[in-house]
Amino acid sequence: MRGKLLQLLMRTSNTFVSGQEISENLGISRTAVWKHIEELRKNGYELEAVPRKGYRLTHTPNHATADEIEAILSTENIGKNIIYKKEVTSTQALAHDMARNDASEGTLVVADYQQKGKGRLGREWHSPPGTGLWFSLILRPDIPPQKAPQLTLLTAVAVTEGINKAAGIEAQIKWPNDILIDGKKTAGILTEMQSEPDRVQAVIVGIGININQQPEHFPELLLSKATSLSIAKENKIFSRAKVIAAILERYEDWYYQYLIDGFEQVRKRWEELAVTIGKEITATTVTKTVEGLAQGITEDGVLLLKKKDGQIEHIYSADIH
Ligand code: BTX
């Protein structure tokens, strides 16, 4: 309900909207309107209130709260149920718990700050408050577990397109799942699942995106390899809610198309957006280093590397440069 109120206030932010109008529009009592307005104020929204004129929104805090996302999101399913937390250990952990407790497909868990953001392979994801987007999506696709990695690639496509749509920045994908701007990492994806032997119960897609960080927000070690949308766009400050809404909208299109038509379109789009494909690269796996021409990816997201001797090497997991 507060999302709808916010939507109304945002639409009419140049003029006043009366308590009566709000109450009629949303089908709630004047007292309920007043309570929601107070709640918005507590959450950092500033509203001018003038007797006989009504309310006018004068300041929106740049937080991707449930209210704010709900006010602008136009999806049917993805992100329709939103859990927002100011602080969590990790949105992944919370989303896993919720998935175990029957949370529906499309449930979004988003936090302003993660104390212990999780990367792949036990690595950490730096998630300071007030700057980025740290969120997890619960999906319940009817697919066998071995196909779940396809969702990582689909996510990379949706995030890259969403960034482009919201910020006008051409991000690129680095295999397997880094999103880069000007060669530096701006987003990471972590796909985990809850599964039976032959059926996926839930896929938890974790997405971390650096939005408004300035160089001083990054720890020394990350400075040379990480960037944010803001750094890439001359320190412009982006609305985090708008960026997440754009990503969720691209996500919904790709995800439901994938469930109907399969992976091929996703694979093609992934290759178009990937910085790696068509380039000479070095892949370092746990056991060896392979050099070759990155030719493309398979149905399962395996990287195909054509070596000097013409042989095609399948790369399942590696760091590439
Ligand atoms: P990854 O293992 O590909 O990347 C982790 C590595 O990236 C780190 O070891 C570090 O070098 C670098 N790194 C850490 N933080 C950042 C950052 N903010 N920007 C750029 N580089 C960084 C990628 O793992 C998966 C990340 C998923 C994060 C989301 S956030 C919401 C959800 N909840 C959660 O705990 N994790 C996911």
Image: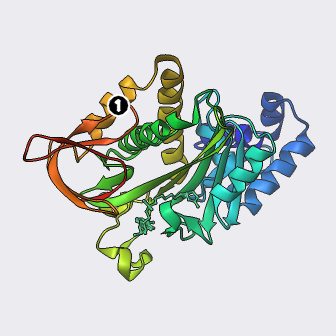
Task: Answer yes or no: disc 1 within 8 Å of ligand 1.
Answer: no
For the point 42% across and 79% down, which residue is it?
219
- Image quarter (top left, top right, bottom left or bottom right) of the C terminus: bottom left
- Image quarter (top left, top right, bottom left or bottom right) of the N terminus: top right
Number of numbered discs overlaid on the protein picture: 1
For the point 77% across and 46% down, which residue is it?
100
- Image coordinates of residue 74 in percent, x first then y, are 58, 30
Q: Is residue 45 visible?
A: no
- Image coordinates of residue 282 in percent, x first then y, are 19, 57
Q: Is residue 297 above or below residue 169?
A: above
- Image coordinates of residue 299 in percent, x first then y, are 38, 31
The residue type indicated by label 1 comes to Arg
For the point 35% across and 31% down, which residue is it?
267
Q: Secondary structure at mark 1?
A: helix
Most distant residue in the bottom direction: 220
Q: Is residue 159 left or right of residue 278?
A: right
User: Looking at the image, which is closer to me, 41 or 79?
Assistant: 79
User: Looking at the image, which is closer to me, 306 or 273?
Assistant: 306
Q: Which residue is mark 1?
A: 267
- Image coordinates of residue 249 in percent, x first then y, are 51, 33
Q: Is residue 8 left or right of residue 21?
A: left
Q: Is residue 253 visible?
A: yes
Colour convention of the picture = rainbow
Q: Is residue 153 above or below residue 255?
A: below
Is the residue marked by circle 1 packed among few (<14), some (14-19), or many (20+) residues within 10 Å? many
User: Looking at the image, which is closer to me, 191 or 239?
Assistant: 191
For the point 72% across and 37% down, which residue is it?
4
Most distant residue in the top direction: 261
